[in-house]
Image (cartoon, helix red, strand yellow):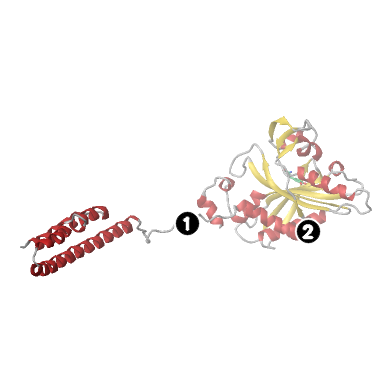
Amino acid sequence: MNDLDQLVQDAQADFAQAHTPAELENAKARYLGKAGRVTELLKALGKFSPEEKKTRGAQINATKQQVEGALTARRQALAEAELEQQLKAEALDVTLPGRRRGEGAVHPIARTMERIEQIFASMGFDVADGPEIETDWYSFTALNNPENHPARSMQDTFYVDSKDAEGRWLNLRPHTSPMQIRYAQAHACKYAGQPTMPDIRVIAPGRTFRVDSDATHSPMFHQVEGLWVGENVSFKDLKALYLDFIQAFFETTDLKLRFRPSYFPFTEPSAEIDIMFESGPLTGRWLEVSGSGQVHPQVIRNMGLDPERSIGFAFGSGIDRLAMLRYGISDLRLFFDGDLRFLSQFK
Ligand code: DAH
């Protein structure tokens, strides 16, 4: 092997040892740089005769080209290796399933409330919202349930150990009935001094609270209050309205309704409303769905109205109970446990 072949071989071996572009540049300098081996050979040409110069020069040029060829090949190999490395590092596994956003759903109780609101709105009723932390006056006194009256213990109320700004004791409302007073007060004043008598039609759905817990009672539950006060509103209007409502709610006319005498301090007379399905899985049993009655004159007065001129009815129904009947659920607690296996069935 002559010295030129040897040089090419050395260069190839040297370049193969370079594993980064910087290492390769250093190796290149050793052959093609100012003091590189190829450059030195070219400088040395001066010593040769013109004849020899020609052949030797051509040989060295060929050698130079081979070295440059080897350099280019190695450069390419390094670039490819680097790309390969990068692709591997940034690899996307396109077979991985995407991250889904959990699909939400309206809670069955919220859905039931919306349903009730829609039905009553379609019958000309306003929908009102009110405070869950109530005063003693709205929860009881205004509803003709005076302090120390035994009827106060009909409900095991959560009392709050503090008073509002006006010094009234607070409680977690045990029913939505305070909304009768709040709404009527806010709306009766609009009629003050006018010849027309108030016509108040409202439902007030919402959360209510009692010290109670078993399969059919929860310390937090939901009621919907209904109130219709006008000049000549009677029990027969209540019966017609409630029957329309309950039939729309259960999507069947195959049920009947009865009033059962009862007692509430804020109504006189008072009645429980029972329904019975005449077809379907619940057939043949009377099911209690609501309290109701003609609004007591004292309550009319507390609304800011004249009981000689305004008369009407009220009702208070358990929303959770209506939802249980509609969906065939036997344990109320399922609604509030937050178990997705249960809740996702209402999508
Ligand atoms: N507030 C009563 C309760 O929670 C239900 C009720 C009964 C509401 C009669 C009424 C009514 O408006 O007239 O037990």
The location of residue 70, given as percent across then percent down, is: 19, 63
Q: Earlier in the sequence, mark 2 or mark 1?
A: 1
Q: Are marks 2 and 1 in contact (CB under 8 Å)?
A: no
The secondary structure type at the circle numbered 1 is loop
The location of residue 228, given as percent across then percent down, is: 81, 52
The location of residue 186, given as percent across then percent down, is: 82, 46
Taking the spot 75% from the left edge, 50% from the top edge, the residue there is 128
The picture quadrant for ligand 1 comes to top right
On the picture, is 241 further left or further right than 188? left
Q: Name the residue beneath numbered marker 2.
A: 124
The secondary structure type at the circle numbered 2 is loop
Q: Residue furthest left?
A: 1
Q: Name the residue beneath numbered marker 1.
A: 100
Q: Foreground: 90 or 130? A: 90
Q: Is residue 324 something one can see in this rendering?
A: no
- Distance from the alpha carbon under mark 2 to that under mark 1: 42 Å
- Crowding at dot 1, Cα within 10 Å, few <14 / some 14-19 / many 20+, comes out as few
Say what amino acid the circle numbered 1 marks.
Arg
Q: Quadrant of the N terminus?
A: bottom left
**Disc 1 Cβ-to-ligand 1 distance below 8 Å:** no
Q: Is residue 291 something one can see in this rendering?
A: yes
